[in-house]
Image (cartoon, rainbow, N blue to C red):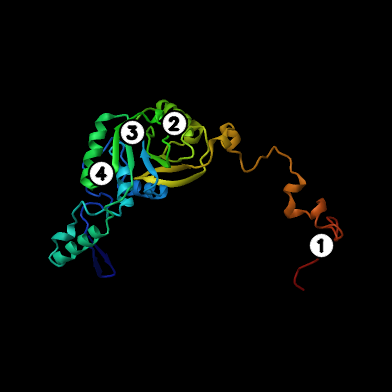
């Protein structure tokens, strides 16, 4: 690509070729896949560790679980792909081989990290295994068939990270609403595990039945999404949804003195007490130039 500006030409050479978000391990994906880079960001937010089980119950093609395993084992994301710059005569071949060797040396090969990748669609589990094999992390994934609405917590530390259907390319809105309602009941039983759910569905918290403890605004391609975090005890959020998500200002609620501290002294006495009050009928000074 090139640009002309005031008789100066700027020439850009694409050394990547295929877009960098494509790692090279996923030639096949599901109906509504996450970009590998977005999946990596979500996995990083969940902080994958060796002593904590990482579970994606909507694994699809396995992208989130694979990215988590790559992060936990320090496997460079570009090891499984080629770059356009490898065919450039101006870049020595040794530069690429040295970089690949350095990245291989950084991999943790004796990691105890474990990720579970499950899905209700058994056909996708074969795709998950093939992708994990190409990524070189199949030994860290336990891939199996399961309904996310019926999963149960194991007696160990764990984190659930998932990308359920949004109603955009999979399921109708009524089906998505029912799915989130069932997820809310099931996932409440997973505490003290942490739960991370990404979706673009605007009424997710209402359907799920709980207000998130923390949210992150993200984009899946051009689609705005929200990552919802749940880490507090659900027993503390047993109130109905509308009581949890109270408005910041209620125009029908009368003000109390303790809500007007910026305008009152202690004891409820106004700041202007003892000072000369504004007299509306007083003669105004004349500011006209003489």
Give the quarter of the image for residue 245.
Answer: top right
Q: Residues within 10 Å of mark 2 (few under 14, many from 20)?
A: some
Mark 4 → mark 3, Cα distance in angstroms: 31 Å
Marks 1 and 2 close (CB-CB < 8 Å): no
Q: Name the mark on residue 183.
A: 2
Q: Position of residue 202 (x, y in %)?
A: 46, 37
Q: Position of residue 117 (x, y in %)?
A: 32, 37
Q: Residues within 10 Å of mark 4 (few under 14, many from 20)?
A: few
In the rendered structure, which disc, 4 or 1, sits on the residue that comes first in sequence? 4
Residue at the image point whose x is 21% and y is 40% from the top: 130
Quadrant of the drawing holding the N terminus? bottom left
Q: Provide the residue designation for mark 4.
A: 139
Marks 4 and 3 close (CB-CB < 8 Å): no
Q: Position of residue 170 (x, y in %)?
A: 34, 31
In the rendered structure, which disc, 4 or 2, sits on the residue that comes first in sequence? 4
Q: Provide the residue designation for mark 3.
A: 169
Q: Name the mark on residue 284.
A: 1
In the rendered structure, which disc, 4 or 3, sits on the residue that comes first in sequence? 4
Identify the element where label 1 is drawn.
loop
Marks 4 and 2 close (CB-CB < 8 Å): no
Name the front one of labels 1 and 2. Answer: 2
């Amino acid at each position: 690509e090139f640009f002309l500006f005031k008789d100066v030409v700027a020439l850009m050479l694409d050394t990547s070729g295929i877009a960098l978000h494509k790692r090279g391990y996923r030639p096949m994906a599901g109906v509504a896949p996450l970009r590998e880079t977005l999946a990596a960001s979500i996995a990083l937010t969940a902080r994958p560790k060796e002593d904590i089980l990482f579970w994606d119950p909507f694994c699809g093609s396995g992208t989130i679980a694979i990215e988590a395993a790559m992060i936990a084992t320090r496997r460079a994301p570009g090891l499984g792909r080629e770059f356009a710059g490898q065919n450039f005569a101006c870049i020595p071949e040794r530069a690429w081989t040295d970089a690949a060797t350095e990245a291989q040396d950084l991999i943790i090969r004796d990691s105890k990290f474990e990720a579970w990748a499950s899905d209700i669609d058994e056909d996708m589990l074969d795709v998950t295994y093939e992708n994990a094999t190409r990524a070189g992390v199949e030994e860290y994934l336990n891939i199996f068939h399961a309904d996310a609405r019926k999963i149960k917590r194991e007696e160990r530390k764990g984190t659930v990270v998932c990308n359920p259907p949004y109603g955009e390319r999979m399921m109708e809105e009524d089906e998505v609403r029912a799915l989130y309602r069932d997820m809310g009941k099931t996932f409440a039983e997973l505490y003290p595990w942490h739960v991370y759910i990404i979706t673009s569905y605007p009424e997710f918290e209402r359907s799920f039945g709980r207000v998130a403890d923390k949210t992150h605004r993200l984009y899946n391609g051009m689609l705005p999404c929200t990552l919802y975090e749940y880490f507090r005890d659900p027993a503390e959020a047993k109130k109905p949804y509308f009581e949890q998500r109270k408005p910041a200002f209620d125009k029908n609620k009368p003000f109390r003195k303790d809500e007007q501290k910026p305008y009152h002294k202690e004891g409820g006495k106004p700041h202007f007490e003892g000072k000369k009050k504004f007299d509306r009928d007083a003669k105004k000074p004349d500011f006209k130039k003489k």
